[in-house]
Structures are given as C-alpha cells and as structure tokens.
Amino acid sequence: MGLMAEIVRTRVERKSMAVWFLGQNGWAVKTPANRVLVVDPYFSESCHPSRRGLDLRRQVPVPIAPEDLVADVVACTHSHRDHADPATLLPARQGGRVGLFLGPAQTQAVFAAAGIADGRTTWPGDTVEVGDLRLSGTFALPTDTTDLTPMGFVVEVDDGPKLWIVGDSAWCDLLAEDGARHAPQALCVPINGGYANLSHWEAAELVRRVAPRQAFPCHFDMFADNSCDPRMFAASLAVKGIGERYAAAVVGQRITVAA
C-alpha cells in the first residue's frame, strides 16, 4: 500500500490528528472527520539543476506521486520552488482530487502557472476552516527578497491539538510571540540555517519560548547543500534544558499528535 492510500485509509481518534512527514517542509495531516491537509508538497526535482551551481538534487525519495495526491486542502507557505512546486501542483490539479489550493500572495502566481485559477489567498492572522480542520496563518520573516509574503500555519482539529508548521523564516522576536499566542502542543520547525533560515540553535530558542510538548525538525534532509544533522537541534534543545521536547519525524511514518 502506498503512502497516499495509507493516509486515505487511516482513521483518527477524537482529540488527535495523524501527521506524516513528507520531506523538506512537507507535511500531511488527517483529522478525525477524515479531512486531509497537505502542506508544501515537493514531489519533483524542480530545484535541480541550481542556477548557482549548488547540489539541490533530492536526497529523499518522492513519497507520493503528484497525480495521486488526495487532499481537502493543499497549503503552501511561500512561493519558493521547494514549497510551491509547479511540477507537483500541476499534476495534482490535473488529478482532480484536491479541494482547495491555499497560500499567501506570492504563491498565487505559482498556482496560476500550474493551472490553478481558483487558489485562495491567505495571510498571517487569517483563518480558514474546512470541516473539523482549522488553519490559522502565522507570521514569518522573509529570508530573501524573492518572496516577501511567507507565512506559517497553525493546524487545529475540533476539540483537539494544535500543530504549528512554522515554515521558512529568519529569526525575530515577533516569530516567537506570534507562535506562542496559539499555544500549540507540537511544532514543525526548520533547522538548516542555510540562506537566512532558522538555525538549529534559533529553532531551539523558538521551542523554548513557545513551549510545545513536541518539536519536530524539518527542512534539513532534502538537499546536500542545504542540510543539517537533526542531532544538532536535539543538542541545542538539551543545552537549553528542554531536550525532552525533541521528537523525530521520519518520512512516510505516521505520527499521532494528541491534545
């Protein structure tokens, strides 16, 4: 059974959500009412070759064929190709089994290029509800001038937990303040530190200030020239006295987040 079939068949207990890591900043979330959210699916080799000569060949096998994607919502945090990928979005749209494509302002041009004329624009502070699934937009600080509208998402289910998918962001106090006001039980945070993104030390500081029970590292595994050993994040948490909050996410393996 493939991963998409597993996600479709999975039944989720009340007051919890099922979560799958898809590599880089890709995540799938399923709710007790069988709603499926997919965030930042990167299921191609679009980033390779790099115009700057970097090694951006994917290191992680494609977990789901784009045309097989089944989701009530596909949400992109920003327009960088490893987060809003036309080579993933176009066949996903053609597959006809995605209900809503959602993202901030600069993702809309990517959606349009992928044949998605009805993508919904969202922003930090906006809330989108689909059945028992609720997405609240959170602040992110741009990492370069090619995209000035990045964001994250707090994912919530009825009577259940909150999962904060931080998205790409440079460090600033406002990032921690905005995340903390949602009081998430778990968060998914980039740790790679490349090209102005959060480093493993800054990611650990974010965890310290927001105080979730679980912290899943991401954005460290896809490209040889934009990687970080997740043990560095675990060590940074330990140095800050919160090592018990570290939680590993393995591509394609189900995680349960409970209230």
Image (tube, rainbow, N blue to C red):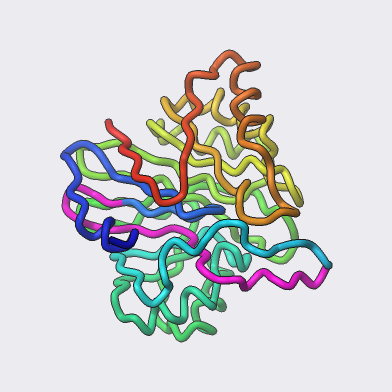
Left/right placement of residue 195 relative to residue 10 reads: right
Foreground residue, 135 or 68? 68
Q: Is residue 135 above or below residue 85?
A: above
Q: Is residue 246 above or below residue 153?
A: above
Q: Is residue 157 magenta?
A: no
Left/right placement of residue 59 relative to residue 64 reads: right
Q: Position of residue 122 (x, y in %)?
A: 45, 62
Residue at the front extreme, as displayed: 1
Left/right placement of residue 50 relative to residue 124 reads: right
Residue at the right extreme, as displayed: 52
Residue at position x 48%, y 35% from top? 248
Left/right placement of residue 36 relative to residue 27 reads: left
Q: Position of residue 110 (x, y in %)?
A: 55, 76
Residue at position x 57%, y 34% from top? 176
**Over which residues does the magenta segment extend?**
30-52
The quadrant in which the N terminus is found is: bottom left
Residue at position x 28%, y 56% from top? 7
Q: Is residue 88 above or below residue 131?
A: below
Foreground residue, 240 or 102? 240
The quadrant in which the C terminus is found is: top left
Q: Position of residue 129 (x, y in %)?
A: 28, 56
Q: Position of residue 70 (x, y in %)?
A: 30, 68
Residue at position x 60%, y 49% from top? 219
